[in-house]
Amino acid sequence: MSRSGWDWVFQEGRVRSGGRPLRPGDAVSPGDVILLDLPGPLLGVLPALGGVRVVAEGSGWWFVDKPAGMHTVGQLPWENFSLTSAVAGELQKRGVMEPEIFSRLGEPPSLEGGLVQRLDFSTSGGVLVALNAAVKESFREMIRGRELVKTYLALVAGEFLAPRGEVVFHLADHGPSLKRVVDGSHPHTETVRLEFELLVQASRGALLRVTTRDGVRHVVRATLAALGHPIAGDEAYGGPHPLLASYPHHLLHAESLRWNEIPPLRCPVPSGFLRSLQHWEIDGGSLS
């Protein structure tokens, strides 16, 4: 269960001992009986109260801003702290559709609703949301056909020697949640292609713009780590500490998305990301 999920369980008084609700840090004794009351499985997305920032919208879709430190999809059915819940709440607030209708755009047990993509918990940036089943399937077809072009900003460790270039790697699962680069003979591999452009080289690291058409989990994180340039703050892939306590996330931002002939949809760079760049002696003023 995620930390936010446990916060909700305690706030709702669902952890009890001796007839009283417990709070984090309460002392218990050997032999005490602790009762944990969790709700039964739900198949709907619970709407969040806060809503979400809609950066752009078109016929049957939204492009929304996911902050770093938020799960794209709820970890448990009763959580409403995810981007999916925020979108459901915003749709309800605007009178576009009710949360249960949005829920039906995803297939249980996944609680993704109409979300077309996912970003990691610490990754900020734009996420595409379909508002009906036909549009969602159309975008899924684009992903399978490598027609969705995604661009990221990444602050990486080390000196990046080439001003621009392209790499092709084979990725495979590495443990329950990570990816690693393997040779093409490895079973169950996914071939990925990334283009990169060096924006700024500083003494501590480099700011890159990375472009990919692949919808593979951790495609940017795993590939940059394999190149010897892990993302700052990405400890899972060996990245250095991000240095800024007020923005404790890895420094990867999903900057833009485009398909067909439409102009790129751009998601603003978070202020915390820009402050972190300053700590790495990089001027990110042109990115805001």
Image: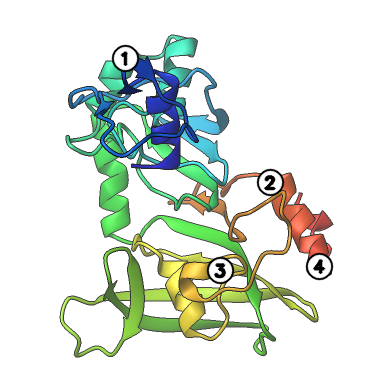
The residue tagged 4 is: 282
Q: Is residue 105 above or below residue 216?
A: above
Q: Where residue 267 sits in the image (x, y, percent)?
A: 61, 45
Q: Where residue 124 sits in the image (x, y, percent)?
A: 56, 49
The residue tagged 3 is: 210
Q: Earlier in the sequence, mark 3 or mark 1?
A: 1
Q: 248 left or right of 6?
A: right
How much space separates mark 2 and mark 4, taking CA atoms? 15 Å
How much space separates mark 3 and mark 1, taking CA atoms? 55 Å
Q: Is residue 273 above or below residue 219?
A: above
Of badges 1 and 2, the one in the foreground is 1
Q: Where residue 20 sits in the image (x, y, percent)?
A: 37, 16
How much space separates mark 1 and mark 2, taking CA atoms? 45 Å
Q: 177 left or right of 52?
A: left
Q: Residues within 10 Å of mark 2 (few under 14, many from 20)?
A: some
Q: Earlier in the sequence, mark 1 or mark 2?
A: 1
Q: Residue furthest front?
A: 30
> 17 or 83: nearer the eye?
17
Of badges 4 and 1, the one in the foreground is 1
The residue tagged 2 is: 270
How much space separates mark 4 and mark 1, taking CA atoms? 56 Å
How much space separates mark 3 and mark 2, taking CA atoms? 17 Å
Q: Residues within 10 Å of mark 3 (few under 14, many from 20)?
A: many
Which element is circle 1 on? Answer: loop
Residue 87 visible somewhere in the drawing: no
Which element is circle 2 on? Answer: loop
Q: Earlier in the sequence, mark 4 or mark 1?
A: 1
Which element is circle 3 on? Answer: strand
The circle on residue 19 is 1
